Image: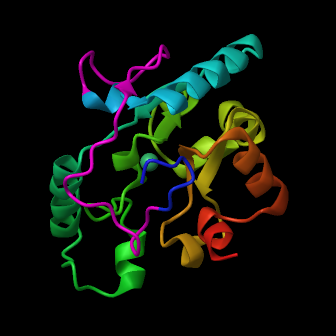
Amino acid sequence: MSSCSVLVNREYRLPASYIPKNLVEPSIPFDAPAGDPKRLLRKDAAKAVHALFQRAKSCQITLWGVSGYRPYSRQEELYKAALKKENLTADSPPEELCKLLVAPPGASEHQTGLALDVSCPDVAFDLVEEFAETQAGKWLKAYAPLYGFVIRYPKGKEAVTGYAYEPWHIRYVSKSLALYLSLTGLTLEEYHRI
Ligand SMILES: [Zn+2]
């Protein structure tokens, strides 16, 4: 669980008791109030994201962090609210549940402290598909692997990852693995299956 290549998804879930060690706040701009746990990441990921955002700045690209670490209990609240809103239950067909942009508790990478949702002013810091078409979104896709991150839920891989396309969700996996995944086009699921 502590490895930065850990696989967390609908199939491989984290226990409710799992809280990563070494959660720290990266020095990057955040669209979340001071003191919010959303601003935390695991130390290795925090260091890498700081370097990534510094590079963005030097390329005149403005990126903001939106949501990093999320405890199990918070994920549970969000999931219940999302199900209710869509009139679904935890036993609804997987295709329907996949369309929800909220993971079930234990199935969210945000609980690992290795994932961060990123946005930019052009889409008003929203987490929307249009982010992919912005200059910042395109830059992020190209540069994230150089700093150890992958766009974790790519377009066309929804059936493999179990999640809808999320161009804003980056996941720290280490520089060598991120480069490998970006060169091969493999998802973390496919990598773990090899
Ligand atoms: Zn996310």
| Residue pictured at 71% horizontal, 42% vertical | 141
Q: Give the left or right position of residue 173, taking residue 18 as reference.
A: right
Q: Is residue 186 above or below residue 48?
A: below
| Residue pictured at 22% horizontal, 61% vertical | 79
**Image location (x, y in percent) of residue 21:** 34, 35
Magenta-drawn segment = 8-36
| Residue pictured at 27% horizontal, 43% vertical | 19
> Is residue 18 something one can see in this rendering?
yes
Q: Give the left or right position of residue 157, taking residue 175 as reference.
A: left
Rendering quarter of residue 49 = top right
**Image location (x, y in percent) of residue 104:** 28, 65
For the C terminus, the quadrant is bottom right
Q: Is residue 22 magenta?
A: yes
> Is residue 61 something one can see in this rendering?
no
Which residue is at the front of the view, 49 or 119? 49
**Image location (x, y in percent) of residue 169:** 52, 46
